[in-house]
Amino acid sequence: MLIRENYLSKIRGFYHSNLVKILVGIRRCGKSVILNQIIEEIKSSGVEDTHIININFEFIEYEELKDYKKLNLYIKDKVKDKSIYYVFLDEIQNVDRFEDVVNSLRASIKNISIFITGSNSKMLSDELSTVLSGRYVLFYIHPLSYKEYIELTHKDAYDMNSFWDYTKWGGLPNRCEFENTTDIKNYLHSVFDSIILRDIVKRLNLQDTILFDMILQYLIDTMGREFSAENIIKYLEKEYKKVSTETLYTYIDALCKALIVKKVYRYDVHGKAVLKTLNKYYATDLGIAQIKNNSQQFKKYVILENVVYNELIVRGYEVYIGKTKNGEVDFLAQKDGLHKYIQVTYELNNEEVIEREFGAFKTITEDSSKYVISLDKEDFSQNEIVHMNLIDFLISDEF
């Protein structure tokens, strides 16, 4: 089993805290596995089974506990003494008013440590943050990073077949069980359909799922390009679909909250401000993007941008598009008060490309790290701008 230490190390310090631990991620990204790994660590520290209450709401044996009052009573009846009880509620969004249960348990039982997981937009909703205001800590769980994918599959990280398999079919752990393309596609379609049917359609009461699918396909097909509501509305009109700007943004917001796509804002490097216009979108998982795109093949540089973006997010960076005086830098990554500017390209195969990628940093005068990342094995570093091989970047613990 792959131990996802990157996440465990962040959660471990909260094991015994009375803050509610919320693990959020796209369906089938591995939240339940991480929850089970937390349980095993807690057990190994000497905690008895009677002090661990573990409920997965996708299991039929817990069907009755989807009634929030029954769930509340069930857990309270399990608490018999003053030692800490560890409560794990997996896929809790299947329980109506679950936030009231969690808040009630936390308020009424002092010796309790609660962990919850969820996949849908309700886990990020205003209702949840209002009810649990200031009393929870949120952990985003992502599909496998490339390094985790290599550890799980035992493949050669530098074998380009491995790399392109990862970039094409993504990092949902269970998809690695399949080798046949048809089987992989069927699995990814089942995951996607569960996201749409169980989360977005139900929560928003969508009447036109075809329109919703068309909007997603447009975002995937234009991934990494500046988003324009006007352009997508014109595209939909050509396809005989009329949509208001308000409805368009409602659907896109639903896609973001379902963690299918992520919005990346631009940052004015010289004005030191986040800009709310001309943002871009990237896919949370490239496998889901693969089955939803209309093109025969993604542009490779866009795929590489998406891979780098996802890796930066996994590593805890806040990521923006860097707007400069003369253009933009692919990414500005911020963490611990430090700024890193990053250009991503497929290959530095001629002087024009080298000048374009390294020249993107010319107007950035602040003292910050600057990187060009590509698949080249030769080191093109120059003028204090570091060139990195993409696979080196993905498997290294240093960045």
Image (cartoon, helix red, strand yellow):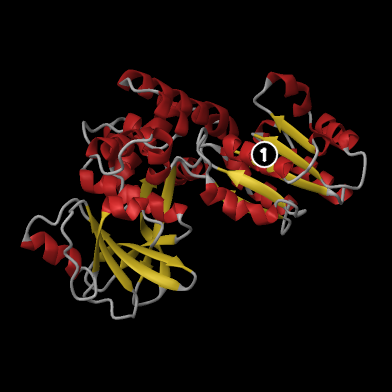
Is 186 positioned to the left or the right of 201 in the image? left
Residue 309 is situated, as x and y percent measured from the top left of the image, at 37, 53
Q: Residue placed at 26% from the left, 37% from the top? A: 164
User: Residue 358's quadrant in the figure?
Assistant: bottom left
Question: Residue at the location (39% across, 20% down)?
Answer: 186
Q: Which residue extends farthest right?
A: 81
- Horizontal side of 168 relative to 108 (left or right) equals left
Query: Where does residue 237 sit, x and y in percent of width and height?
Result: 30, 36
| Front residue of 174 and 269 | 174
Front-lying residue, 219 or 72: 72
Asked if residue 244 can be seen in this view, the reply is no
Give the image quarter of residue 239.
top left
Residue 368 in the image: above or below residue 97 = below
Residue for badge 1: 40
Residue 220, image x and y in percent?
33, 40
Identify the residue at image location x=18%, y=54%: 377
- Residue 383 seen from this side: yes
Report the residue at 90% width, 34% height from top. 77
Q: Secondary structure at mark 1?
A: helix
Q: Amino acid at mark 1?
A: Glu
- Is residue 62 shown left or right of residue 273? right
Q: Specify the quadrant that holds the C terminus.
A: bottom left
